[in-house]
């Protein structure tokens, strides 16, 4: 499964880039009635990647007095209980939903941006050699938390998993999720006759789902080749800062005005497309997550650079503070009082003031 090709197609459709569709291994995007788009099996219009296991969702033991059944895979995972089984199913759905293109509205737009952003950043961290191991682990936990939080998942799922090195594990049982999902797909593929009333796809299609799920998981774990946002004319500098975290960190450390200058150049270019805007939003959140995360007071230098052009300064500050809530978490972790940053707050628009003041 070439996830980069699939990711390119995801961005192509999501941001209306108008590029020719690229043939992928087993799946293709199809529009749904609500103007969203999902991955379907090629040549099988009724079977989608996200829905294949819908009928396999475990019963919720939290709503049943004295639940007395065992997890389906209890023979393979002796420490697994029925509460864990449901949480694992929620994680599977969350991962599989990563490549879905949802119809945006004011209530889901921020979550959609943040989940996609976190997935992309989780794919970058292994190659970010400018970060020490402790910093990489901090950011991996940070991005994975928001990847789940913005899906959104319930509280039990949100706090049930952690990283052991690059392996995502269920904290309570130490079950490695790559192993669990592999066994999960193999079990239903090998026992398809038993579940004919719930499954409408063939064993080879379950196997295709397995490969895509595991590739998405390995990307989250940082074990697969990192993803890159594909090129677009006029966006080269921004994309280089996005696709190469080390380049962003090195450039900023050597001469931060180089990075600020690339932001300025983007704003001075009046040519706007959804993909270009997404690139700029991503760059600003990279500045938040790779610069301000470790040294919040760097924001003073950003304001000093742009304050002579108030409209640009306001655009950048408000995108940083209202496109995502990463900066909220950073301020909370570091007990930062925003009222002490008057030079920042003075550029807040009405929405930012409503959220923060």
Image (cartoon, rainbow, N blue to C red):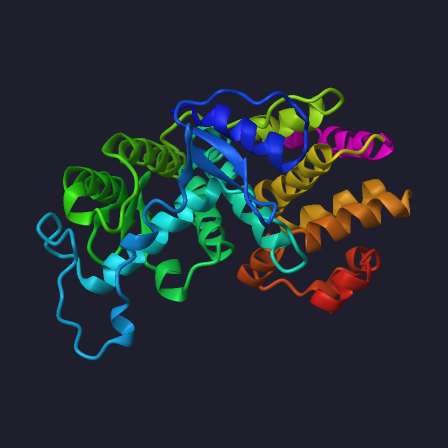
Q: Nearer the viewer, residue 275 or 139?
A: 275
State the residue at coordinates (49%, 20%): 23
Residue 331 position, x and y percent, is: 60, 59
Residue 348 position, x and y percent, is: 80, 58
Within the magenta stretch, is there residue 268? yes
| Figure check: 128 above or below 326 | above
Q: Does residue 293 show up? A: no
- The magenta stretch is 250-270
- Most prominent secondary structure in the magenta stretch? helix
Residue 192 position, x and y percent, is: 18, 42
Residue 144 position, x and y percent, is: 44, 48
State the residue at coordinates (31%, 58%): 87
Q: Does residue 23 show up? A: yes
Q: Quadrant of residue 180?
A: top left
Within the magenta stretch, is there residue 228? no
Q: Quadrant of the C terminus?
A: bottom right
């Amino acid at each position: 499964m070439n996830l980069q090709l699939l990711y390119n197609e995801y961005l192509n459709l999501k941001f209306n880039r108008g590029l020719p569709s690229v043939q992928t291994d087993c799946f293709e995007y199809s529009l749904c009635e609500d103007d969203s788009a999902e991955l379907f099996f090629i040549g099988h219009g009724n079977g989608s990647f996200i829905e294949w296991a819908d009928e396999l969702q475990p019963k919720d033991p939290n709503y049943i007095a004295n639940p007395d059944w065992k997890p389906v895979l209890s023979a393979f995972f002796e420490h697994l209980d029925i509460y864990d089984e449901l949480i694992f199913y929620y994680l599977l759905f969350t991962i599989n939903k990563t490549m879905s293109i949802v119809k945006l509205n004011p209530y889901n737009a921020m979550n959609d941006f943040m989940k996609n952003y976190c997935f992309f950043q989780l794919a970058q961290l292994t190659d970010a050699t400018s970060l020490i191991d402790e910093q990489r682990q901090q950011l991996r936990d940070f991005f994975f938390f928001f990847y789940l939080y913005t899906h959104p998942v319930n509280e039990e799922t949100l706090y049930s998993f952690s990283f052991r090195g690059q392996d995502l594990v269920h904290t309570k049982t130490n079950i490695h999720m790559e192993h669990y999902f592999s066994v999960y797909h193999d079990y239903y593929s090998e026992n398809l006759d038993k579940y004919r009333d719930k499954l409408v796809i063939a064993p080879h299609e379950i196997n295709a789902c397995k490969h895509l799920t595991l590739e998405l998981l390995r990307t989250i774990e940082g074990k697969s080749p990192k993803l890159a946002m594909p090129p677009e004319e006029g966006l080269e500098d921004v994309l280089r800062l996005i696709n190469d975290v080390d380049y962003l960190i090195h450039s900023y450390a050597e001469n931060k005005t180089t990075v600020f200058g690339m932001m300025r150049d983007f704003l001075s270019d009046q040519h706007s497309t959804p993909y270009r805007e997404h690139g700029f939003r991503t760059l600003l959140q990279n500045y938040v997550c790779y610069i301000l995360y470790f040294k919040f007071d760097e924001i003073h230098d950003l304001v000093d650079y742009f304050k002579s052009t108030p409209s640009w300064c306001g655009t950048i500050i408000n995108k940083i503070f209202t496109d995502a809530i990463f900066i909220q978490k950073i301020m909370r972790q570091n007990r930062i009082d925003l009222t002490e940053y008057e030079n920042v707050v003075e550029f807040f628009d009405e929405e930012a003031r409503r959220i923060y003041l």
